[in-house]
């Protein structure tokens, strides 16, 4: 087995995960936020590594 | 005779890999922008940039720390510090001026956070791959990283489920160095660490290699772009935990009882598309960007996978699990806590740095015992 097989395996697993997720949770482009968060006037809403651990507080 | 045949075959294989992947990446970017939204397409492009820079210019976190600990070679760490300083110089004023639209990488300093960072530092030296490193290595054909990555995701999910319990052991609220004073303090502290590192360096090593210098500047530009486009800094661990959480839900698990996944923001990302989660998009971009570089690098993909003893593979898998779990408790990995944390003024980034570096010293001693290299 070479690094080529491993690279294709990594990309293949990624593609499979995306395909399954697209089937379960298709994105809605009509809900898309402004292109840039800066100057959008909207609060940041994404999840992040440092997100608080407490639900609702 | 054999070499005249082998070279064209290798070149043909390389060309075979480059074009389909290039077209696939461009199609993926266009499809993401079209079907998820322009912002998400842009974040994926930034993620690709991270992968191209990290793999193409061989910029990392675990390796330079190892070089400093084992050979007292400070070049890689100095490049990291420079990159963080460049981001801080732009990000901290932006955050101060736009607090309703942008958010920093804030984390809570506590017992579990410190312990998590220490354990992360140890585990990342066992597999020689941090958060970003595991993604980039997997994309470029590293078998150890490919074994570690799925368990990194599972570890991050388990850590998120247990995070409330760990945090209740004792944690301060986020402490943020903000505004002009925060920027001054951050830059002064980065300079102080650079001086300390230079003082400890071996003679003749006190320089940053040109490719690391270029990578530091490019990464800073991409990280600032991430903040401006996504409204939040560059992170890794959240996306990996989300992938495992989505997998668990698909297999029938109910995460609504988890304090972490029941929180509104996390519940929303869990029910939404991966293509609308910023850390997932940059993670995907890093894997694919590194893969693209690997296809361009002659002979790179024809190398055989490493021959490790069984306990080496077990160590890689366990290290992946530990990396995911510990980075969740530490409110980030080398990217979300160290790089983005310090660059956006979060004090937990500094504590993470100290604890993970101490853990790295232990991790390097564990590598031979884990079957990852010859015993010294």
Image (tube, rainbow, N blue to C red):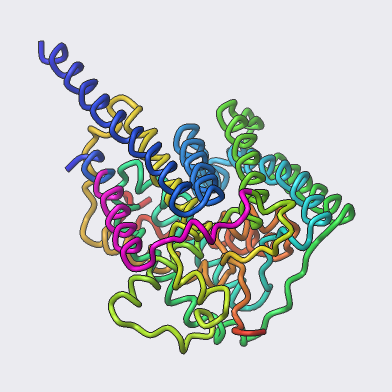
* Rendered residue at 53%/80% (across/down): B260
Image quadrant in which you'd find residue A20 = bottom left
Q: Is residue B35 left or right of residue B114?
A: left
Q: Main secondary structure of the magenta part?
A: helix
Image position, residue B86 (x, y; %):
72, 41
* Rendered residue at 47%/81% (across/down): B161
* Rendered residue at 78%/61% (across/down): B99
Q: Nearer the viewer, residue B286 or B168?
A: B286
Image position, residue B373 (x, y; %):
33, 50
Is any part of residue B369 visible from this angle? no
- Per the rendered image, the range of residues in magenta is A8-35
Image quadrant in which you'd find residue B200 = top right
Is any part of residue B151 visible from this angle? yes
Q: Is residue B232 left or right of residue B366?
A: right
Magenta-drawn stretch contains A17: yes
Compared to B103, does A8 lie above or below?
A: above
């Amino acid at each position: 087995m070479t690094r080529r097989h491993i690279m294709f395996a990594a990309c293949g697993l990624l593609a499979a995960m995306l395909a399954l997720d697209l089937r379960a949770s298709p994105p809605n482009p009509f809900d898309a936020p402004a292109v840039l968060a800066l100057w959008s006037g909207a609060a940041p809403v994404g999840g992040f590594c440092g997100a608080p651990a407490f639900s609702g507080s | 005779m054999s070499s005249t045949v082998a070279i064209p075959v290798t070149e043909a294989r390389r060309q075979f890999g480059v074009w389909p992947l290039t077209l696939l990446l461009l199609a993926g970017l266009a499809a993401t922008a079209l079907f998820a939204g322009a912002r998400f397409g842009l974040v994926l492009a930034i993620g690709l940039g991270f992968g191209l820079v990290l793999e193409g210019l061989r910029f990392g976190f675990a390796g330079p720390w190892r070089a400093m600990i084992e050979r007292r070679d400070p070049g890689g760490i100095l490049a990291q510090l420079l990159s963080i300083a460049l981001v801080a110089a732009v990000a901290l004023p932006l955050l101060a001026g736009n607090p309703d639209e942008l958010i920093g990488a804030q984390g809570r300093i506590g017992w579990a956070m410190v312990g998590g960072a220490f354990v992360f530092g140890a585990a990342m030296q066992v597999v020689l791959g941090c958060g970003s490193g595991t993604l980039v290595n997997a994309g470029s054909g590293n078998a150890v990283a490919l074994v570690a990555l799925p368990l990194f995701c599972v570890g991050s999910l388990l850590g998120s489920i247990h995070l409330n319990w760990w945090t209740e052991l004792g944690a301060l609220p986020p402490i943020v160095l903000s505004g002009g004073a925060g920027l001054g303090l951050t830059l002064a502290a980065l300079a102080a660490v650079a001086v300390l590192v230079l003082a400890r360096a071996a003679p003749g090593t006190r320089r940053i290699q040109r490719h690391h210098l270029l990578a530091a500047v490019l990464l800073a530009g991409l990280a600032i772009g991430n903040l401006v486009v996504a409204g939040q800094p560059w992170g890794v661990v959240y996306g990996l935990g989300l992938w495992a959480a989505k997998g668990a839900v698909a297999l029938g698990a109910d995460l609504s009882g988890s304090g972490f996944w029941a929180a509104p923001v996390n519940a929303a990302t869990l029910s939404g598309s991966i293509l609308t989660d910023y850390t997932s998009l940059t993670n995907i971009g890093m894997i694919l960007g590194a893969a693209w570089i690997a296809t361009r690098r002659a002979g790179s993909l024809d190398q055989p996978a490493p021959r490790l003893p069984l306990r080496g593979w077990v160590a890689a898998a366990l290290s992946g699990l530990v990396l995911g779990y510990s980075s969740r408790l530490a409110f980030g990995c080398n990217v979300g806590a160290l790089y983005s944390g310090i660059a956006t003024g979060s004090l937990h980034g500094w504590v993470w740095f100290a604890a993970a570096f101490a853990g790295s010293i232990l991790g390097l001693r564990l590598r031979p015992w884990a079957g990852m290299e010859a015993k010294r």
